[in-house]
Amino acid sequence: MEVYEWTDWARLNTEPGRAKDKPQALDGVTVLDLSYGSFAGLFASSLMAEMGARVIRVEPPEGDIARNMTPQAMKVKDTGLAYIVEGRNKHHITLDINIPKGREIFLKMLPKVQVLIETFPPRYMENLGLGWEVLRERNPSLIYCAINSWGQEGPAVDEGMGQGTLDYDVVAQALGGFAWTVGLPEDYTEFPEYTRVPTRMGNWMGWYMGGAMAAFSIMSALIFAEATGEGQFIDISPAEALATVNNYAFHVYYLTGLVIGRVANFEPAAYAYHYVQAKDGMVFLAGYADPNWKALCSIINRSDLVEKYPTVKDRTNPKNFIPMTQEIEKFTKRYTREEILKIWLDYRGPGVTVAGEVLKPLESMKLEHWHERKALMKIKDKDYGELLVQGITSKMSGTPPVLKWVCRPVGADNSLIYRELLGYDEEELNRLKAQGVV
């Protein structure tokens, strides 16, 4: 028997290039994704599609408005940059469920699927006659996941919040408490006043955290359904999902009545644990426990800082963050990022302190490590040409995820899906298209 080193075994057995030859965990699961204007639902179905589920994206005949959510109106053919990534591995059909014929077709498809995802306003589907009570009569094992910033029920929804509005990432960030914690503090008077305001996270973290929680919940429900034959309704609020990872902010307020203010690039629980300026960019430094703080100060030859800020409590006082950093940067600004890394790696004294290079986007994209691990992948897509996209996150030896294709144009799979699920031929599809149903 051939013997491998552990790293060789792991590389061989989790290599994404071999994934297409292995089974997938969600083979045999069919998902109808009715997401509209929300990347929370799109991300949830993307994760399931990577794991082998057959995901059928249902867009209105004119396409999902999410295809237009892209910087500076940049598109590849008919589709914005973000949607191209979240259209991966999915079949795309069109159907207008707002008209009776569209709802009739939707109900015919329902018994043939295991999962339904939608991101409409609360009670929207119920008002169309497609609520949970109706749908589970048609398909008792159905897993129905509804995603909206406010959730589907509760006092705020009863008072009208969320009703009539789509699921918005910026609302999730605000309700989840994150917008308040991101940005420059109001008392950092070294910066212009207009910059010292609550700041949304640069990417759609509310949507993506909500989508991840939705996918996890759906997969858990699939296990239960396999054992019992029973489906269930899942109510996901991206705001609540985001709040679950807001670490200690709620607890501090509950215990002390104090609100953790914005702290820019600093960590309220640890210093040093932040970014500092180098001669050619930024470097991350860590050394927050007392022995490690002493090690950091030893490297920069500043024992006076140990005496001035001797305890974790001293170093995590927000009033000390700026002056401490200014003193550290008197050293780091004299060196390049590469030189700083070497200085830290050469340290052999007591304590542990860490330095890490903050890569610029182009530098990160060129890093061979990400390409070898297929975290970044160049794809030649038959519809959208050559693209660089995010690849596969989970490296699994048994049932790995697979990136099969990137995206599909609006309604590209109408013929395939409607023929397979409902037996419709091209003549019937043309008739439905002329009626505005598909």
Image (cartoon, rainbow, N blue to C red):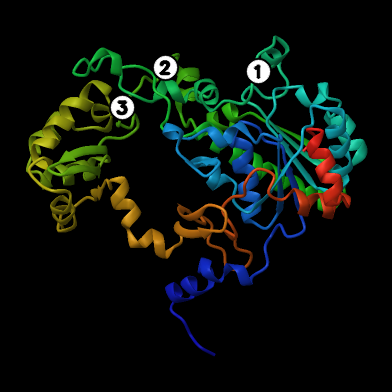
- The x and y percentages for residue 257 are 45, 13
Q: Nearer the viewer, residue 180 or 18?
A: 18
Q: Mark 2 or mark 3, which has the lower sequence index?
A: 2
- The x and y percentages for residue 89 are 63, 54
- The x and y percentages for residue 398 are 62, 68
Element type at mark 1:
loop
Nearer the observer: mark 2 or 3; the answer is 3
Badge 1, how many Cα within 10 Å: few under 14, some, many 20+?
Answer: many
Residue 259's tag is: 2
Q: In this view, does 391 lie to the left or right of 291?
A: right
Element type at mark 3:
loop
Q: Distance between the residues labelled 2 and 1?
A: 27 Å
For mark 3, what is the residue? 264
In percent of the image, x 21 and y 24: which residue is there?
A: 320
Q: In this view, does 79 lie to the left or right of 352?
A: right
Q: Nearer the viewer, residue 228 or 434?
A: 434
Residue type for callout 3: Ala
For mark 1, what is the residue? 162
Residue type for callout 2: Val
In percent of the image, x 86 and y 45: which residue is there?
A: 428
As displayed, is residue 193 above or below residue 60? above
Q: Which residue lies furthest to the bottom in this view?
A: 1
Q: Which of 103 and 124 is in front in this view?
A: 103
Q: How far apart are marks 3 and 1 (CA)?
A: 31 Å
As displayed, is residue 307 above or below residue 180? below
Badge 3, how many Cα within 10 Å: few under 14, some, many 20+?
Answer: some
Q: How far apart are marks 2 and 3 (CA)?
A: 15 Å
Q: Mark 3 or mark 1, which has the lower sequence index?
A: 1
Which quadrant: the C terminus?
A: top right
- The x and y percentages for residue 47 are 61, 49
Q: Can residue 206 be seen in this view?
A: yes
Residue type for callout 1: Gly
